Image (cartoon, rainbow, N blue to C red):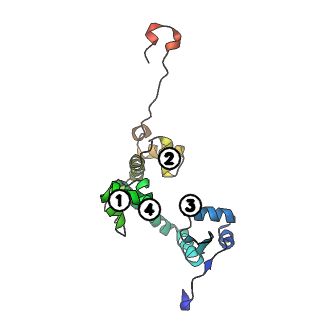
Amino acid sequence: MKNGQKRRKVSRLAEIAGDSRVSVRTVQRRCRTGKIPTARRCRRGRWKIDIDLWREIRRLASNPAIRQDMTKGRLAFEFTMTANGISEDDLNDLGSLRERDPAKYRYLAKMPYRVNPRAYEALATKHGVLKMKLEKLRVNHREITPDALARESGVSVRTLRRRCRKYGIKLRDLCPVRRHRKPKIDSGKLHDLAA
């Protein structure tokens, strides 16, 4: 801050709601979900937000070049966590991770995280992000379907199919769909009994 001014904390969310052109309830929801990084909850349960820092982050995020670098950094972090086999449950429950897997805990305990040296190189390939998201689904023990992959990538299934066509990848190869045929037992014919 200039000339030793103190940063101003805001207890009322109306100012941020006005800047963002959303309701106060939406700002509260964003604070709860962590979308406003400077939000802290005080003892009374009210949200305190460093308004100057929030405006600075918002100004930086409005610059397309900086936003692209931030996105690359987030993807590189995801790649590193996936490459080390660290799931979202591991990140959310460090207490039990210490007993379950000491090696992962030691990796997470040392700050700052070291990004995998090949992360940016792998993500720069035409389908690197898709493969990383697919592996992240596997690490988190989720069912691998086109819907789940699209949700993880933050796009619709239709956009996911379009990207796969663009990269020359078959979505069936990424997400094998198991089709279950109904048996034809009702017909009464002997050769139709096989499923």
Indicate which disc residue 74 carries.
Answer: 4
SS class, disc 2: helix
Residue 138 vs 78, above or below: the answer is above
Kindly identify which residue carries mark 1.
Answer: 98
Indicate which disc residue 33 carries.
Answer: 3
Q: CA gap, disc 4 to disc 2?
A: 18 Å
Q: CA gap, disc 1 to disc 3?
A: 25 Å
Q: Nearer the viewer, residue 85 or 156?
A: 85
First in sequence: mark 1 vs mark 3? 3
Identify which residue is drawn at 36% across, 63% down: 108
Q: Position of residue 156 (x, y in %)?
A: 54, 47
First in sequence: mark 4 vs mark 1? 4
First in sequence: mark 3 vs mark 4? 3
First in sequence: mark 4 vs mark 2? 4
Identify which residue is drawn at 44% across, 34% down: 177
Kindly identify which residue carries mark 2.
Answer: 150
Badge 2: residue crowd in 10 Å (few <14, some 14–19, many ≥20): some
Residue 102 vs 179, above or below: the answer is below
SS class, disc 3: helix
